[in-house]
Image (cartoon, helix red, strand yellow):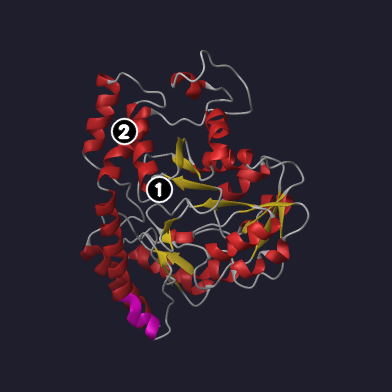
């Protein structure tokens, strides 16, 4: 069986976890390994970073920092994971879904202004598959209408838009370290706080509403409850598992890009014959090989292809069911304008196996099976 995903494992991870337990004797958050991971990201991204228990919680923190209130509206694509919306619905916001671009599967920046009202508070671009949204235009719109931009860069670590890392362009960004991501701690994430005026409150929110972080830095003589907050700190064992991956982050990224490019080369003949569509990477974007997907001609063909690959021990999957078609999506949000591409393109998309340990010969086997499927049609 070639699985859809296999969590990234670096042998030194067990060494670091053992050190956390036996050497540093600290399992809760903000220990030595959390500090190392944080320092790595802050040096890499050039902004304030706080590790969290998930990307979901990073987005929840961003919603709190943006002071999202009941009755506010937040604009985002419907082709995304439920956490993108949940973080703002929890604050009482109403979601305004807009259509995506057919080429990148990202939010269509030309449709955002049509969804803006007097209640709009934020725009949440989702960088699907680690390919950047059209951030220059999104930032222009946000500035013109005095809106927050909160980047859901769950899939975007090491990817960039016009030389800037995804997640560092808006006021806030969020990464995921779920086991399906390029870099993982099992469950986990981080928030990037890109404007200094929000850093102090971000630390407080993350520490259950206390100024504990300032206390440990010697900035106050005691700490107490001073604001809203929750427990967003990941365990030291999670950070210890992540740290050795960061030490070879470039190597991991290059490996995934190599695998992605091999898929593309093996399948481009089918695209030229108009059997399938392959991913599109805009020239201003540097992606990270997070997902390799193809698009079939319709949903029926997709179902048949997934079943066919399963017969050859290959696990391929579809992706998001658009949120505006869900029970909660109808309750907490609405689609603005015409759903030209969101539903239709989501029904065509097939995610192929993609992970660090995937072998080149396995990719050639997968692509050979896909070619075999289309030969029979």
Quarter of image, res 352: bottom left
Predominant secondary structure in magenta? helix
Q: Residue at x 46, y 74 (%)?
A: 296
Residue that mark 2 sits on: 240
Q: Position of residue 345 (x, y in %)?
A: 54, 70
Quarter of image, res 211: top right
Left/right of residue 343 with respect to residue 358 in the rendered view: right
Residue that mark 1 sits on: 45
Q: Position of residue 110 (x, y in %)?
A: 63, 70
Mark 2 residue crowding within 10 angstroms, few (<14) / some (14–19) / many (20+): many
CA gap, disc 2 and disc 1 = 20 Å
Q: Which residues are magenta?
A: 266-272
Q: Nearer the viewer, residue 113 or 86?
A: 113
Whether residue 317 is visible here, answered yes or no, is no
Q: Residue at x 35, y 53 (%)?
A: 5
**Is residue 271 shown in magenta?**
yes
């Amino acid at each position: 069986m070639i699985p859809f995903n296999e969590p990234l494992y670096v042998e030194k991870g067990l060494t670091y976890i053992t050190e956390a337990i036996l050497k540093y004797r600290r399992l809760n958050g903000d220990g030595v390994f959390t500090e190392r991971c944080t320092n790595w990201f802050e040096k890499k991204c050039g902004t304030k970073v706080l590790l969290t228990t998930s990307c979901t919680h990073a987005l929840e923190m961003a919603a709190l920092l943006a002071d999202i209130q009941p009755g506010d509206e937040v604009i985002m694509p419907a082709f995304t994971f439920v956490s993108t919306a949940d973080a703002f619905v929890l604050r009482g916001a109403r979601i305004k879904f807009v259509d995506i671009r057919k080429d990148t599967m990202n939010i269509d920046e030309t449709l955002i202004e049509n969804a803006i009202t007097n209640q709009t508070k934020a725009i949440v671009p989702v960088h699907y598959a680690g390919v950047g949204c059209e951030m220059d235009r999104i930032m222009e719109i946000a500035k013109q209408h005095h809106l927050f931009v909160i980047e859901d860069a769950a899939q975007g670590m090491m990817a960039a838009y016009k030389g800037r890392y995804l997640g560092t362009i808006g006021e806030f960004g969020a990464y995921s370290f779920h086991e399906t991501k390029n870099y993982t701690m099992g469950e986990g994430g981080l928030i990037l706080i890109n404007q200094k005026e929000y850093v102090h409150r971000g630390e407080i929110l993350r520490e259950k509403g206390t100024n504990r972080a300032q206390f440990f830095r010697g900035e106050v003589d005691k700490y107490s409850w001073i604001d809203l907050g929750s427990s967003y700190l990941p365990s030291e064992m999670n950070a210890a598992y992540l740290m050795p991956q960061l030490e070879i982050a470039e190597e991991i990224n290059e490996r995934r890009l190599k695998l992605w490019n091999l898929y593309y080369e093996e399948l481009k003949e089918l695209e030229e014959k108009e059997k399938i569509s392959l991913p599109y990477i805009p020239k201003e974007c540097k992606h990270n090989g997070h997902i390799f997907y193809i698009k079939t001609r319709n949903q029926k063909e997709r179902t048949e292809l997934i079943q066919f690959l399963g017969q050859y021990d290959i696990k391929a999957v579809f992706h998001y069911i658009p949120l505006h078609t869900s029970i909660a999506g109808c309750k907490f949000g609405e689609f603005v304008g015409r759903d030209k591409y969101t539903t239709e393109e989501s029904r065509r998309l097939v995610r192929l196996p993609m992970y660090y340990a995937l072998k080149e010969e396995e990719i050639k086997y997968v692509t050979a099976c896909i070619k075999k499927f289309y030969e029979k049609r």
